[in-house]
């Protein structure tokens, strides 16, 4: 058996690979790590995963030398609108190399941006489909923007020029409208954008009663940095936010998923400020028009009422005379009815008096005494029974023509 040194063995592997695989190959892979060296080389780690995306099936190192990287990077960014980044699926033209010291690796000679664009478009479609299935894609747009959106929560970097442009545009508006702005700082580029913006939105949500609208502004920067706004998590946070969200995070030709679910998408931070100024201006004009029309209606009503009062004042004497005649007629009829009633009442009572006089006359004791009856009294009281008298009692007998005094024996 032949004995080889490690260097000799690696040299044979190198020769075998160079002989067996001398051509360049187009390889599909996903970037799992990426770094650049000082001289300008780009070092990648490529992987292939199973359909679940959790298990690695293959792994290899790849190098893009400076001269190639300087050509491929602007070409890729211009075509895709994004920088080459970890997690992207790429189609690379590579040659296989083996170094006695560093082992197996791939050298990248070309990069097909259309493959990555297709994968990005697929991921974007999947995110939009998921948001649609969740029923939230139109949720923020269905909110009602305040008529006077003057309390503004801003999500941006404190040092961003776009943030300053937005505030200056609001403060210097030609109508003199006043706005209250509060910054909720967030990173607007890099790997931490998604978590940082979501954290800022959560902070706003805790004090949402103090604000009318949320503005997310990025302003400037490379188009390649927009991929972080094609995030399902961040788009879902915006879609479900309880206040209208205005996004000004890209350029006119770039619509991210966050733009798609926001209440309104504008091109620049300045445009976001103009959007709010225009809303306040429209409301102010509507209020001014309403005030004018209300004043016109009040003045018109006052003129009509004045004319009506003048007409009534002209008719008042004739109306008073007519009313006087009617009331006099009513009083005359009332007096007549009262007179007739009194006469009837007096006549009825006179008849009753006559009957009472006849009854009294018939009951007169003198008439009874005239018929032969007598009335006996004792001590001024009428004697009704012999048992009421005692021996020695003096009684008076009243007759028709006199009295007889007697003593009981």
Image (cartoon, grey):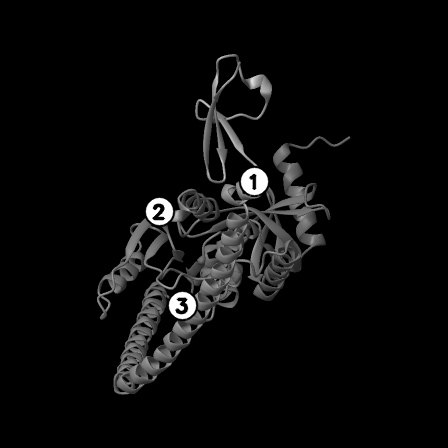
- Name the image quarter holding the N terminus: top right
Instruction: Tell me, yes or no, if residue 82 can be seen here.
Output: no
Mark carried by residue 37 = none
- Apparent side of residue 74 relative to residue 11 in the rendered image (left or right): left
Task: Give me the residue at 38% from left, 55% from top.
Answer: 212
Considering depth in this image, is 48 or 1 the residue closer to the camera? 48
The image quarter in which residue 192 lies? top left
Considering depth in this image, is 40 or 169 the residue closer to the camera? 169
Task: Give me the residue at 29% from left, 87% from top.
Answer: 318
- Nearest to the eye among marks 1 and 3: give it: 3
Ranked by sequence position, the earlier of labels 2 and 1 is: 1
For label 1, the residue is 102
Instruction: Give yes or no for contact between labels 2 and 1 (Cβ–Cβ under 8 Å).
Output: no
Instruction: Tell me, yes or no, if residue 264 can be seen here.
Output: yes
For label 2, the residue is 185
The image quarter in which residue 319 lies? bottom left
**Label 3 secondary element:** loop
**Label 2 secondary element:** strand
Image coordinates for residue 77, horizontal then vertical, percent = 48, 63
Tell me if residue 34 comes above or below residue 249 in the rendering.
above
Task: Give me the residue at 51% from left, 48% from top.
Answer: 360
- The residues tagged by marks 1 and 3 sit, at their Cα atoms, a distance apart of 49 Å
- Apparent side of residue 324 relative to residue 388 in the rendered image (left or right): left
- The residues tagged by marks 2 and 3 sit, at their Cα atoms, a distance apart of 20 Å
Task: Give me the residue at 30% from left, 53% from top.
Answer: 181
**Label 1 secondary element:** loop
Ranked by sequence position, the earlier of labels 2 and 3 is: 2
Image coordinates for residue 7, horizontal then vertical, percent = 61, 36
Instruction: Classify mark 2: residues with Cα within 10 Å, few (<14), some (14-19) or many (20+).
Output: some
Instruction: Classify mark 1: residues with Cα within 10 Å, few (<14), some (14-19) or many (20+).
Output: few
For label 3, the residue is 267
């Amino acid at each position: 058996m032949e004995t080889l040194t490690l260097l000799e063995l690696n040299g044979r592997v190198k020769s075998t690979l160079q002989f067996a695989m001398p051509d360049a190959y187009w390889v599909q892979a996903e970037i799992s790590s990426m770094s650049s060296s000082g001289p300008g080389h780009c070092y990648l780690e490529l992987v292939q995963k199973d359909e679940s995306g959790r298990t690695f099936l293959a792994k290899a190192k790849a190098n893009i030398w400076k001269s190639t990287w300087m050509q491929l990077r602007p070409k890729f960014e211009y075509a895709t609108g994004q920088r080459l980044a970890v997690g992207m699926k790429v189609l690379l033209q590579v040659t296989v190399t083996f170094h006695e010291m560093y082992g197996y690796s791939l050298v990248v000679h070309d990069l097909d941006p259309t493959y990555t664009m297709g994968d990005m478009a697929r991921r974007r479609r999947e995110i939009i489909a998921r948001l649609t299935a969740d029923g939230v894609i139109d949720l923020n747009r269905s909110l009602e923007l305040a008529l006077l959106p003057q309390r503004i929560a801003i999500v941006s970097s404190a040092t961003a020029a776009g943030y300053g442009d937005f505030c200056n545009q609001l403060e210097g508006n030609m109508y003199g409208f006043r706005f209250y702005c509060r910054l909720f700082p967030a990173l607007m580029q890099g790997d931490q954008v998604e978590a940082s913006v979501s954290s800022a939105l959560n902070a706003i949500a805790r004090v949402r009663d103090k604000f009318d609208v949320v503005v997310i502004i990025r302003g400037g920067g490379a188009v390649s940095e927009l991929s972080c706004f094609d995030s399902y998590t961040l788009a879902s946070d915006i879609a479900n936010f309880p206040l209208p969200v205005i996004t000004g995070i890209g350029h006119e030709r770039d619509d991210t998923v966050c733009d798609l679910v926001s209440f309104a998408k504008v091109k620049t931070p300045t445009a976001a400020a103009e959007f709010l100024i225009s809303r306040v201006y429209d409301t102010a004009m509507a209020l001014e028009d309403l005030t004018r029309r209300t004043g016109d209606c009040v003045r018109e009503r006052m003129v009509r009422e004045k004319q009506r009062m003048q007409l009534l004042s002209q008719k008042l004497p004739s109306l008073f005379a007519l009313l006087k005649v009617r009331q006099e007629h009513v009083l005359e009829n009332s007096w007549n009815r009262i007179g007739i009633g009194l006469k009837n009442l007096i006549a009825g009572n006179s008849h009753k008096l006559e009957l009472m006089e006849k009854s009294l006359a018939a009951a007169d004791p003198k008439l009874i005494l005239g018929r032969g009856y007598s009335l006996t009294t004792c001590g001024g009281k009428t004697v009704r029974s012999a048992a009421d008298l005692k021996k020695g009692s003096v009684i008076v007998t009243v007759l028709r023509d006199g009295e007889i005094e007697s003593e009981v024996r």
